[in-house]
Amino acid sequence: MSQTALSAPAAEAPQGAAMKPRQLVMMGLGSAIGAGLFLGSGVGVQAAGPAVLLSYLIAGTLVIIVMRALGEMAAARPASGAFSVYAADAMGATAGATLGWLWWAQLVIVIAAEAVGAAGLLATLWPGVSVAALSVLFMAVFTAINLLGVRNFGAFEFWFAILKVAAILAFIAIGIALLAGWLPGVSSPGLSNFTAHGGFAPKGWGGVGAALLVVIFAFGGTEIVAVAAAETQDPVRSITRAIRTVAWRILVFYIGSLSVIIAVVPWTSEALKSPFAAVLQVANIPGAAAAITLVAVVALLSALNANLYGASRMIYSLAERGEAPRFLGAADRRQVPVAAVLASVAFGFFAALLELWYPEKVLPALLNVVGSTCLLVWAMSLISQLILRRRADRLGTPLPFRMAGFPYLTWLGLLMLAGIFALALLTEGPRMQLLSTAVFTLGIAALSEVARRLRSRG
């Protein structure tokens, strides 16, 4: 975002401006609506009780700050490498390459987990179906979609997002009708569950903190909007609109749906293993469990589609900057980065084979590998914005979108992340994930620096 950075070629997107602004906005709406909300929100409720709403408000505030910071940088310099490019501008090529490779590795693992997870959910409805075969099918279908180009990816993601948004709004409407006593034959529980069973915060601030570690990862994926901005028509206006939806999206979809769940289902209930289905069963909605399972499958496949797009563009950007093998920066005659797409799905197909050899063991293993990567991405993005915004202000560089409250909100976001890192270090499971991610990140940084020095000598 310095004058040099703004005028330099920005690791341009291979496909050009093929995505429509409305598709980017809908991607912004749907990017964080995944299985973490449909299936994982119950874990947070059980960890903190009704006070999990505080965990969502804290995490939501952090996400809003991060997305505002990313929006400022993406509007100034739309690039497929997004935060990797900005980190390179702010802190040097090694920092940018490290962040890019770290995010790409995370997405490659997540893509595999989402394919296996979606197949496993469908297998609960049709027990005779092979999870491994379904995983291969999902990987093949979404590989083909991404190979057809960003226009098709944008269209699929647009309709996926609409379906998820409609499902959430319908759920909230049913919950309001239930609580108001408008459903025939169903008595309203009122709002007693907010204070019954030990009060609003039955596990105190410790429970809120434990839930926060669960909740924070549900928002992972929102940053992909910054990557997609580079291939969107009128990127400045589009990214600005998408970023501005973040705040009310969190309030309506997360806080709204969680409030319904907490009001209808006691936080001590075992039914919270599938919280949305539990509410619909109380509302006496036929086929509730099957319906919400199908919606969760759609949410996972939508995330797979978006993550495959993001991973392929990140590795393409790294190759364009000389930070990855050159062949990954090639595109076909339709300007589709075929090699980058295929490199990003290879592990997903391998994971499907592992599911065949080790049934029901692959998904838990993959989920344990994906830990605190998004926290590092957010932290480095905020540090990049802090450096680049000050540089732009010092040089008098005009910015098309300026983050309000700078630098105070940026520092607030960094302080919140420092608190979450500290909390993770004090908690046994997250501690191991955080330390493993730190070691992995340092390894990537060392390899990137060595590779750069070897290239300079050559």
Image (cartoon, rainbow, N blue to C red):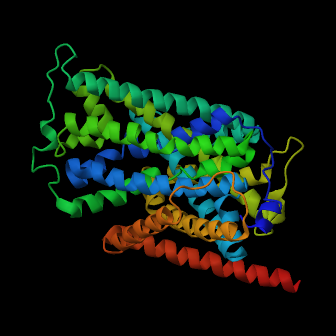
**On screen, residue 277 above or below 202:** above
Q: Is residue 343 visible?
A: no
Q: Quadrant of residue 424?
A: bottom left
Q: Which quadrant: the N terminus?
A: bottom right
Question: Who is closer to the viewer here, 89 or 115?
Answer: 89
- Compared across the picture, whether 431 is left or right of 77 comes to left
**On screen, residue 315 above or below 441:** above
Question: Who is closer to the viewer here, 368 or 166?
Answer: 166
Position in image of residue 399 (x %, y %): 69, 56
- Compared across the picture, whether 375 is left or right of 353 comes to left
Q: Quadrant of residue 193?
A: top left
Position in image of residue 425 (x %, y %): 36, 74
Q: Which quadrant: the C terminus?
A: bottom right
Q: Quadrant of residue 274?
A: top left
Residue shown at 60% from the left, 56% from the top: 70
Position in image of residue 452 (x %, y %): 77, 79
Q: Is residue 200 visible?
A: yes
Question: Who is closer to the viewer here, 333 or 250?
Answer: 250
Residue shown at 84% from the left, 45% from the top: 335
**On screen, residue 109 above or below 426:** above
Residue shown at 58% from the left, 29% from the top: 159
Question: Who is closer to the viewer here, 285 or 77?
Answer: 77
**On screen, residue 429 above or below 286:** below
Position in image of residue 394 (x %, y %): 68, 71
- Compared across the picture, whether 393 is left or right of 176 comes to right
